[in-house]
Image (tube, rainbow, N blue to C red):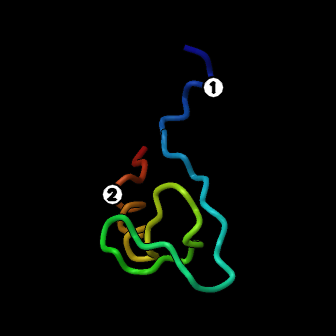
């Protein structure tokens, strides 16, 4: 195990690009509109679910 293996947080922090306007993608958890374009392919979360998911998966060192 090298010194660079000390990063215990395995969460990918990349985010899709913000939409300039409607249509917006739906949240995969609650189906509310997100801030992301409908054309984005991947998991999209609304601001509330994004916050809750960040709390749930946060790294507690």
Q: Residue at x 37, y 80 (%)?
A: 32
Q: Nearer the viewer, residue 17 or 53?
A: 17
Callout 2: helix, strand or loop?
A: helix
Q: Nearer the viewer, mark 1 or mark 2?
A: 2
Q: Residue at x 37, y 61 (%)?
A: 53
The image quadrant that residue 27 belongs to is: bottom left
The relative height of residue 20 versus residue 4 in the rendered view (above or below) is below
Q: Earlier in the sequence, mark 1 or mark 2?
A: 1
Q: Count the marks.
A: 2
Q: Position of residue 50 (x, y in %)?
A: 43, 67
Q: Position of residue 58 (x, y in %)?
A: 41, 53
The relative height of residue 61 versus residue 20 in the rendered view (above or below) is above
Q: Position of residue 33 (x, y in %)?
A: 44, 80
Q: Residue at x 46, y 57 (%)?
A: 43
Residue on which the image places disc 2: 56
Q: Position of residue 47 (x, y in %)?
A: 46, 76
Q: Nearer the viewer, residue 31 or 6?
A: 31
The image quadrant that residue 41 belongs to is: bottom right
16 lies left or right of 11: right
Residue on which the image places disc 1: 4
């Amino acid at each position: 195990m090298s010194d660079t293996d000390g990063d215990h947080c395995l969460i990918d922090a990349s985010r899709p690009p913000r939409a300039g306007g409607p249509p917006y993608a739906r949240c995969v958890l609650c189906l509310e509109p997100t801030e992301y374009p409908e054309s984005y392919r991947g998991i999209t979360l609304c601001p509330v679910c994004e916050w809750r998911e960040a709390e749930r998966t946060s790294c507690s060192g």
